[in-house]
Amino acid sequence: MPEPNPAHPTPGAPDAPSIALPAGAALPPGLVLRRPTPDDHGPVTAVIADWWGLPPTTHLPLLLPRLFFQHFADTSFLGEDDAGLAAFLIGFHSSSRPEVAYIHFVGVRPDLRTSGLARTLYGAFFDEARAAGCTRVEAITGPGNRRSQAFHRAMGFELTGDTEIDGVRAWRDYDGPGEHRVAFTRTI
Amino acid sequence: MPEPNPAHPTPGAPDAPSIALPAGAALPPGLVLRRPTPDDHGPVTAVIADWWGLPPTTHLPLLLPRLFFQHFADTSFLGEDDAGLAAFLIGFHSSSRPEVAYIHFVGVRPDLRTSGLARTLYGAFFDEARAAGCTRVEAITGPGNRRSQAFHRAMGFELTGDTEIDGVRAWRDYDGPGEHRVAFTRTI
């Protein structure tokens, strides 16, 4: 899909800094990391339901609108290998809370789940956030996403909530009526 | 609703700069502008369908998640008067395209529609974006939102799209399958 603003054919990509891996980290063989562009919005949102093991719903892509690929490319990563899209991490540095970096969406192709790739992506995001002056990383997930909760716990995040929903601490109606969320927070 | 991170009880609010009105602009009598806080997320998302004249849907709040109130408070405005919530503009300055400021969501209470309030909010956002080094403002709407299209045209925005949908130029599947959008762009 062509870009809506012809004056900016590849916004975000050209000036983005190169991506450094965390000390000691390695990528799965053949996998290359780069910054996302708006053209990646369709392919990424198309795999979310499948990778997350969710039923496809019409509102799922609305959680990750094109604006993230247009405006937060320089703090996000996308991985590709011979099989195509392999992983992505979409995050940004908070404007009104400069000490905070926020991870909005992360996905790893199911066949790469045991590769340590998510940990490497998080590590690279932590390093860049630290270099930009952030001291804390935050993220959220749904109460039912036990895999995400276990991963964030293993990555040193504290899980917060104001009530118990489906057996886990979560914030009721965090993102609207019925949209409960578990919040993750971690110093870096 | 209490904040999910107890270490940051009122993120975004304390250090936000004061809001200057554009030259010659005035607010409706009794209306006060301030920066939004995460506590405004519920009240704002609760009025969207009503103010926009849309049927309430479960996915509408997902277009404006809490993260905008947590992380972009310093580039956003909220207006209140004796009747309560009067208007809001939620926007941010692009990270990967530093020349661009993006207006994500705007609402004006229907009884204030002829007051020039939306124009004043846009003018204040333009002024702050210009002061931060931005040279362009962008926004989007749905093909069916003729009021938004007329307003942005009157505010000097160019409307772009790659096809015609419901009689207007729009970008097909811009935010996902069936999620067509008209894009607005304007130099400042």
Image: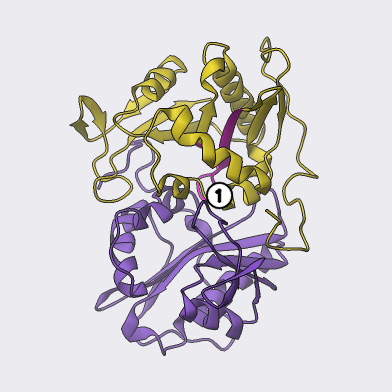
Chain colours: A yellow, B purple
Q: Report the front residue among B6 and B148.
A: B148
**Residue sitting at 39 percent across and 86 percent down?**
B28
Tell me if residue A93 is in the magenta stretch: yes
| Residue drawn at 56 percent across, 24 percent down | A122
Q: Main secondary structure of the magenta part?
A: strand
Q: Amino acid at mark 1?
A: Ser
Assess disc 1: are there few (<14), some (14-19) or many (≥20) residues with their C-alpha within 10 Å of its C-alpha: many
> Does the rendering let one see residue B16?
no
The image position of residue A118, as x and y in percent, is: 55, 21
Camera-side residue of B180 and B70: B180
Q: Relative to residue A173, is residue B103 depicted above or below? A: below
Q: Which residue is labeled 1 in the image?
A: A95
Q: Is residue A13 magenta?
A: no
* Picture coordinates of residue A170, whole percent (x, y): 26, 33
**Residue A114 vs residue B94, the one in the foreground:** A114
The reply to whether residue B160 is visible in this rendering is yes
* Residue range corresponding to the magenta coloring: A86-104
> Where residue A19 sits in the image (x, y, percent)?
73, 28
The subunit carrying tag 1 is A
Identify whether B149 is placed above or below A7: below
Above or below — where is A65 with respect to A17? below
**Residue B90 x, y percent position in the rendering:** 47, 62
Q: Secondary structure at mark 1?
A: loop
Which corner quadrant of the image does residue B182 belong to?
bottom right
Question: In this rendering, would A78 be left or right of B43?
Answer: right
Rendering quarter of residue A43: top right
Task: Determine which quarter of the picture holds residue B138.
Answer: bottom right
Query: Of residues A36 and A98, which is closer to you in this image?
Result: A36
Left or right: B91 in relation to A129: left
Counting the numbered discs, the total is: 1
